[in-house]
């Protein structure tokens, strides 16, 4: 890890001023991803701006019925919050399946949005990676790709986004609130992360001088009947091979409201719009769930070692929807 | 700072037998309060920190090293490379008269050569005032290479494997009858291929060394399973007498074989300390452990079994291919258990080896048998399916009276009893044989069994026992404590042998300044020390009795040892009124401030004599007996029918490990092996990129060892029948319980799903 | 706030460590773990991976468990840190420390400090009603601390010796007994 200077921001304006004046600066929240990446020499900031003392640690109801989550809310506090547990159980579950209790006590909501991939080749300085060094190529292709993308990948990059929380946020139509010296911007969660294309080093639509200050959840009644299902290589403390965030409501046997997103399959949390289209209004049967999964996964492309993920994603979608339908919510 | 650990307690008045009891560990308090110091935790004023630079090619020559940027980092003291490192001696050829010659993890003379032999070989060491500066410096050393052709793809090179030659210790192959012909003629047969991936030990303590020179003497704190190998190897490399090297290693944060050999980090810390004239500390990064410390070899195995319709085995074939590094490593006894477990008429076992340009393999918990039993015991289960027999019944039908391959006698063999008890504890009779026939809600339930088998070993050990007039005892032996509970067990043994309370015994260990102890390996440490400790206690009692006999006042006057027993802190006549007296009284009367007995000699000549004695005893013993720990592993798994996720839900292991010294620590050892076996079965794999030989998951985040949530309550028990050929009847327990574990799970997975998985790990994609 | 010392910028940090106010001049890149081990000599907190993947470095910050390896010490200026050296009440070991010994919840001892600190934090979290990934009803007010709950909540602490049964047993005993309530009170 190279030496850097450290600034602690007392309020949001100070943080925004610092990021716009210090060259090669980075915000640091819980540090659970950034410190690791700095130790691996993947991130090399000259200045670290500590934002953990900013007054952004609240979870509060919005006048319109939604919930506003401060960017400095710790993952564990988010998951344990009454509002989230009762109205958006999939979000609590998603956060609780991520990392470990210790890391969730450190990690912030804002930082979780900006987590970087766990691709083995991104982490290995000796490997070619266009995410680390634009244009260098991708050693993951043809290598160990169990954890890699089946949707939205490119020839430049096949990495996946590692966050669980973001999958739930994508399903819940969350909005990311970003501020800079230029003003406040509201970014729909589904547009916050971007697919790799030719520029896998660009991972979000957040500008370099912008600070995530909050995440807002709209009021979504169906979210009270929701669940997050994560499939991984051990029972806990591992990244997802495939995960599904789903909310389902039926009226007279037909699906009257649905939200569906996938994790572990793409460079961004994957909102399953195609599947939702098939599901809405259709009878809540296995046949419908299967058709929805097939529709979403039709464009899926496997890497050398992850063809199983297409079938796995299909099965987890169907199983999660079926359980929601038959057993109800995790709340 | 350089004291061996001592654990002293007040001595209670009366003694009762200690052996067999579930006594708390003597080091429990220091380990639960953070007071136990591991090798990176010895404070030295003026300490400097080191970090390694690793090669990024599999084979080649260093074309250039640019250390300018690294040297410019504030606080960097030295960048040591092959261009400026002092000369060290290359590792010596292996000699059976000096087993420390086995100590080198590789034959590479680090930083004394421009040759690179594997991706990850250390090519530079950066020493700095701070840890942060050392690591930053290491990241800035630029190395260029002329690459050379290399082979590293095990799957592709496997066909070039050569039969392993037999030597004094290991045998590469054996035959009885004509197994292939019998196989071809067998009415029922299976002929199967299994693969197991490379594994890494992943002790939670990364390898760490603190080294401080004083003139031509050096003190080394090093997490080691064999301090004496470390001492002798360092003495040889730096051209100083072994007496000038003191290795201190009282607490080792897990090892599992990974700290048996001497690896680069240890040597280069001592080198860095010599170059900089400062005490130097190096804790390998987790990645550094993967890149510089060998792991378990991958394997491909063929197991073919032929049987009569009634299940009697007519043919057993087990062959294996494993890899070595081109610069070191050793063969694994993959087929060992296949010589001992089944009474087949015809047997063929053969191990084959291929050398690759990779970091050499090394021993890891039950090297050979852990993966060999996976193949053999899976194949037995498949044969049982073919025969329509219960897998335990098939095993019992083929349970031998004598060692199948050569007819030698078993020192001890109680597999029948282990299975009988295990089946009862587990509830095997409730299993319905048909695959996919058992469910719990949406989960598919499966039950599987497999045999555990691991040879028992015993090595030379020097021990001293000192008795003080206050009735306390000090046992000194340079043995190793990586968590097995050795100090506790030996204190129990000494307490009973001398008839003193457990609390009166103090153990000193983990320091080469002590009498030479055995290495911790082959599950042999406890038995090795016990043998010497018992005979030292015997000598001590004789000396004490001799002292008493000389006194006209002693009720022991004129007594012989045969008529005397040690109890209640003294020697007493057996039978009758039990007249006798306390050690305190005998020693005090004689004016002695202590008495000491010693077994073994640490002089150079004495050490060689001891080694010769040990080797000839070993050879004689092996000609007479087949000795092993064994057991029956029962497991229940739940498989998610949608995703193929496997969860182990129940476990029963019953083991034949002879006399159990400490019921608490033995249970922990046995459970620990099973936990590692669960990891081996379901999730562990070191990923070596077949395109360049580079390990791609050198991290605890990406190499999946079991976590709390993976492990159910594990029921372990033992038969507690002494092995008559072992000291106190005890058999080592460190490794046996990992054997058979993966097969039990694979068999249970088959029972749950109907799917046979012959390639480890059994990740969910194999069950979709 | 930066001062130059020995060519490297250092920051003055004040932390209460095990009840004692400590003042340190550290480079901002020094982790909390290295600050404890290398600068304060508190080597009870262990380094197992230095990447947040094993939990050996777990300490309590204002009663909450974190991985000190991924924490920059400078970010914890002004906070109260409790390490394994500080969990005992004077000469009286913490109930979990003695329970770990009784249940043999360790072998080599290297993950033990982290396991114990983690368990203290875990019992406080559970006492405060926090759910886990295996909690069946997220909206429930009280969650029974079953073995499955303990295992999931402790999964951030690897034990390669495989002493998991003993660890769960020790935690179960402390959580269910009188001593368990003391633990939770103390950690709150």
Image: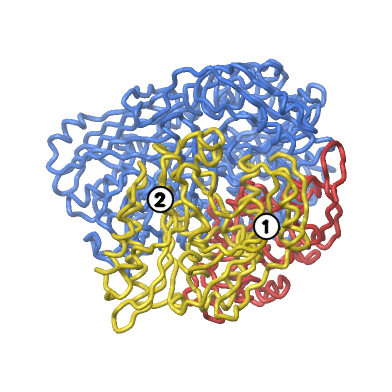
Chain colours: A yellow, B blue, C red
> In the rendering, at what x and y percent does residue B37 appear?
72, 46
The residue under the point 73% across, 72% down is C186
Between B587 and B578, the one lying in front of the other is B587
The answer as to whether the residues below labels 1 and 2 share one chain is yes
**Residue C47 in sight from this viewpoint:** yes
- The N terminus of chain B lies in which quarter of the figure? top right
**Mark 1 or mark 2, which has the lower sequence index?**
1
Cβ–Cβ below 8 Å for labels 1 and 2?
no
Residue located beneath label 2 in the image? A152
* Residue situated in front as seen by the camera: B3 or B385: B385
Residue C89 vs residue A162: left or right?
Answer: right
The Cα–Cα distance between marks 1 and 2, rounded to whole angstroms, is 29 Å
Query: What secondary structure is found at the residue carrying circle 2?
Result: loop
A250 or B347: nearer the viewer: A250
User: Could you say which disc has been placed on residue B315 in the image?
Assistant: none
Image depth: mark 1 or mark 2 in front:
2
**Dot 1 corresponds to which residue?**
A29
| Residue A325, image x, y percentages | 34, 76
Give the letter of the chain under mark 2: A
Question: Compared with residue B112, is residue A327 higher up or lower down, i.e. above or below?
Answer: below
Whole-percent x and y of residue B89? 64, 16
**Residue at image coords 48%, 17%:** B148
């Amino acid at each position: 890890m190279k030496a850097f200077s450290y600034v602690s921001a007392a309020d949001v304006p100070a943080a925004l001023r610092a990021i716009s004046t210090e060259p090669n600066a980075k915000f640091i929240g819980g540090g659970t991803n950034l410190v690791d990446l700095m130790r691996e020499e993947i991130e090399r900031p000259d200045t670290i701006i500590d934002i953990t003392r900013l007054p952004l640690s609240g979870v509060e109801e919005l006048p319109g019925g939604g919930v506003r989550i401060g960017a400095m809310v710790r993952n564990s506090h988010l998951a344990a919050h009454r509002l989230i547990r009762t109205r958006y159980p999939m979000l609590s579950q998603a956060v609780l399946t991520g990392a470990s209790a210790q890391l969730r006590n450190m990690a912030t909501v804002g930082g979780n949005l900006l987590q970087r991939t766990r691709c083995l080749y991104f982490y290995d300085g000796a490997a070619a990676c266009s995410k680390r060094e634009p244009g260098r190529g991708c050693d993951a292709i043809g290598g160990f790709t169990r954890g890699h993308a089946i949707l939205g990948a490119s020839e430049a990059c096949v990495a996946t986004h590692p966050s669980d929380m973001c999958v739930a946020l994508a399903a819940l139509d969350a909005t990311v609130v970003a501020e800079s010296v230029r003003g406040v911007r509201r970014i729909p969660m589904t547009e916050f992360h971007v697919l790799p294309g030719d520029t896998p080093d660009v991972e979000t639509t957040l500008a370099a001088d912008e600070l995530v200050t909050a995440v807002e959840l709209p009021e979504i009644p169906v979210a009270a009947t929701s669940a997050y299902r994560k499939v991984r290589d051990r029972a806990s403390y591992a990244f997802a091979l495939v995960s599904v965030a789903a909310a389902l409501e039926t009226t007279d046997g037909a699906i009257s409201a649905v939200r569906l997103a996938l994790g572990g399959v793409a460079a961004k949390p994957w909102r399953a719009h195609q599947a939702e289209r098939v599901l809405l209004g259709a009878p809540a049967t296995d046949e419908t769930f299967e058709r929805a999964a097939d529709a979403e996964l039709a464009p899926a492309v496997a890497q050398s070692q992850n063809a199983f993920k297409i079938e796995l994603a299909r099965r987890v979608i169907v199983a999660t929807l079926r359980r929601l339908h038959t057993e109800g919510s995790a709340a | 700072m350089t004291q061996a650990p001592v654990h002293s307690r007040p001595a209670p008045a009366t003694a009762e037998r200690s052996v067999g009891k579930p006594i708390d560990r003597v080091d429990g308090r220091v380990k639960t309060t953070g007071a136990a110091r591991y090798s990176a935790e010895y404070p030295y004023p003026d300490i400097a920190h080191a970090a390694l630079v690793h090669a990024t090619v599999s084979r080649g020559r260093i074309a250039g090293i640019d250390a300018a940027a690294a040297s410019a980092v504030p606080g960097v003291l030295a960048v040591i490379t092959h261009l400026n490192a002092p000369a060290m001696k290359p590792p010596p050829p292996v000699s059976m008269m000096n087993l420390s010659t086995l100590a080198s993890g590789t034959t590479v003379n680090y930083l004394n050569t421009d040759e690179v032999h594997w991706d990850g070989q250390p090519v530079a060491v950066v020493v700095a005032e701070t840890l942060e500066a050392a690591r930053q410096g290491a990241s800035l050393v630029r190395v260029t290479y002329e690459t050379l052709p290399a082979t590293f793809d095990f799957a592709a090179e496997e066909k070039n494997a050569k039969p392993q030659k037999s030597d004094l210790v290991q045998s590469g192959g054996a035959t009885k009858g004509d197994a292939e012909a019998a196989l071809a003629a067998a009415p029922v047969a299976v002929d199967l291929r299994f693969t197991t991936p490379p594994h890494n030990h992943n002790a939670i303590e990364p390898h760490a060394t603190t080294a401080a020179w004083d003139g031509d003497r050096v003190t080394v704190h090093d997490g080691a399973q064999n301090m004496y190998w470390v001492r002798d190897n360092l003495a040889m490399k730096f051209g100083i007498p072994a007496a000038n090297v003191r290795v201190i290693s009282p607490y080792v944060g897990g090892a599992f074989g990974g700290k048996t050999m001497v690896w680069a980090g240890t040597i280069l810390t001592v080198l860095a300390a010599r170059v900089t004239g400062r005490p130097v500390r190096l804790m390998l990064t987790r990645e550094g452990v993967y890149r510089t410390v060998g792991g378990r070899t991958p394997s491909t195995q063929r197991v073919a079994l032929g049987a009569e319709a009634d299940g009697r085995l007519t043919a057993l074939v087990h062959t294996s291919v494993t890899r070595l590094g081109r610069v070191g490593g050793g063969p694994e006894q993959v087929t060992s258990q296949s010589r001992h477990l089944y009474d087949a008429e015809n047997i063929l076992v053969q191990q084959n080896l291929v050398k690759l340009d990779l970091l050499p393999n090394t021993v890891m918990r039950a090297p050979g048998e852990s993966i060999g039993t996976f193949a053999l015991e899976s194949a037995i289960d498949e044969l049982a399916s073919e025969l329509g027999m219960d897998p335990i019944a098939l095993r019992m039908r083929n349970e031998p009276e004598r060692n199948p391959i050569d007819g030698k006698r078993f020192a001890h063999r109680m597999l029948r009893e282990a299975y009988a008890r295990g089946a009862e504890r587990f509830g095997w009779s409730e299993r319905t044989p048909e695959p996919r026939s058992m469910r719990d809600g949406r989960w598919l339930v499966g039950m599987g069994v497999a045999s555990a088998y691991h040879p028992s070993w015993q090595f030379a050990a020097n021990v001293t026992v000192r008795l003080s007039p206050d009735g306390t005892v000090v046992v000194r032996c340079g043995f190793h404590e990586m968590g097995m509970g050795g100090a506790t067990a030996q204190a129990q043994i000494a307490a009973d042998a001398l008839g003193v309370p457990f609390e009166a015994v103090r153990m000193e260990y983990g320091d080469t300044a002590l009498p030479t102890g055995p290495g911790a390996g082959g599950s042999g440490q406890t038995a090795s020390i016990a043998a010497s400790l018992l005979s030292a206690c015997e000598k001590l009692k004789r000396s004490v009795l001799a002292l008493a006999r000389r006194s006209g006042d002693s009720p022991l006057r004129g007594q012989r040892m045969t008529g005397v027993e040690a109890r209640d802190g003294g020697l007493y006549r057996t039978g009758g009124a039990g007249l006798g007296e306390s050690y305190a009284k005998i020693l005090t009367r004689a004016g002695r401030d202590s008495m000491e007995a010693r077994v073994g000699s640490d002089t150079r000549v004495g050490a060689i004599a001891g080694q010769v004695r040990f080797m000839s005893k070993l050879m004689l013993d092996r000609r007479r007996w087949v000795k092993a720990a064994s057991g029956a592993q029962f497991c229940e798994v739940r498989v998610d029918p949608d995703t193929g996720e496997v969860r182990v839900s129940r476990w029963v292991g019953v083991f034949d490990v002879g006399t159990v010294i400490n019921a608490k620590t033995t249970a922990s050892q046995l459970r620990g092996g099973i936990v590692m076996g669960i990891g081996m079965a379901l999730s562990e794999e070191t990923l070596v990129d077949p395109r360049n030989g580079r390990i791609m998951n050198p991290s605890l985040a990406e190499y999946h060892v079991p976590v709390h949530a993976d492990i159910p309550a594990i029921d372990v028990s033992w038969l507690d029948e002494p092995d008559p050929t072992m000291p106190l009847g005890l058999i080592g327990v460190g490794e046996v319980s990992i054997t058979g574990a993966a097969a039990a799970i694979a068999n249970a997975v088959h029972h749950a799903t109907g799917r046979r998985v012959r390639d480890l790990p059994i990740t969910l994609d194999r069950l979709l | 706030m930066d001062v130059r010392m020995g060519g490297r910028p250092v920051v003055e940090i004040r932390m209460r460590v095990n009840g004692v106010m400590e003042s340190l001049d550290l480079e901002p890149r020094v982790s909390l773990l290295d600050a404890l081990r290398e600068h304060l000599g508190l080597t009870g907190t262990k380094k197992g991976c230095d990447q947040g993947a094993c939990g050996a470095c777990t300490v309590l910050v204002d009663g909450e468990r974190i991985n000190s390896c991924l924490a920059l010490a400078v970010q914890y200026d002004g906070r109260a840190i409790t390490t394994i050296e500080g969990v005992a009440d004077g000469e009286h070991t913490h109930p979990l420390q003695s329970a770990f010994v009784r249940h043999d919840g360790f072998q080599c001892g290297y993950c033990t400090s982290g396991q114990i600190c983690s368990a203290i934090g875990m019992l406080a979290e559970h006492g405060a009603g926090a759910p886990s990934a295996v909690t069946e009803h997220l909206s429930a007010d009280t969650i029974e601390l079953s073995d499955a709950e303990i295992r999931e909540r402790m999964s951030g602490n690897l034990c390669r010796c495989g002493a998991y049964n003993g660890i769960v047993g020790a935690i179960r005993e402390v959580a269910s007994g009188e001593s368990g309530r003391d633990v939770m009170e103390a950690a709150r």
